[in-house]
Amino acid sequence: MPAKLPTHNQRIGRWGESAAAEYLIAQGCEVLARNVRTPYGEIDLVAQHGDVTLFVEVKTRTSASFGPPEVAVSARKQQHMLAAAEHYAAEHAVDHWQIDVISVEGRPGMKPVITYFESAI
């Protein structure tokens, strides 16, 4: 059986995550992992900035029709992000960490508009 092709939303999401990773690297961070699965959900990016581990949720939108990307981080999503971060931190003996959100607006072929929300949760 042939592999399933990614959906439009999956392609946009991957593009946004790559743009967010490039942004973090330009800010002096080291991206340690992408799409980390935990029993509580997926962590889009795990990065290191100095002695702080960053757990980053990336939200991407191609237009402002439904508002900025960050509005998609619901209270329920925040709970899952916190549980996933705590799980990862416990498994990897991470002492200093924070949860950030990166909003990416645009589409492949365009320069992304990035908004970074540090310690969002």
Image (cartoon, rainbow, N blue to C red):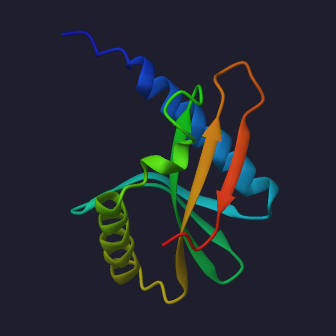
Name the residue at the top extreme.
Answer: 2
Residue 11 lies, with reference to residue 83, above or below; the image says: above
Q: In x, y percent, where is residue 109?
A: 72, 18
Name the residue at the bottom extreme.
Answer: 95
Q: How many marks?
A: 0
Residue name at image x 57 percent, y 42 percent: 68
Left or right placement of residue 73 versus residue 118 in this view: left
Left or right placement of residue 54 versus residue 7 in this view: right
Residue 74's image quarter? bottom left
Question: In front: 85, or 4?
Answer: 85
Q: In x, y percent, where is residue 10?
A: 42, 27
Residue name at image x 66 percent, y 84 percent: 51
Residue 25's image quarter? bottom right
Residue 46 lies, with reference to residue 103, above or below; the image says: below
Residue 42 lies, with reference to residue 121, above or below; the image says: above
Question: In front: 71, or 22?
Answer: 71
Q: In x, y percent, where is residue 100?
A: 56, 65
Residue name at image x 30 percent, y 64 percent: 80
Q: In x, y percent, where is residue 115?
A: 69, 51
Residue 98's image quarter? bottom right
Residue name at image x 80 percent, y 61 percent: 27
For the N terminus, the image quarter is top left
Name the residue at the left extreme.
Answer: 1
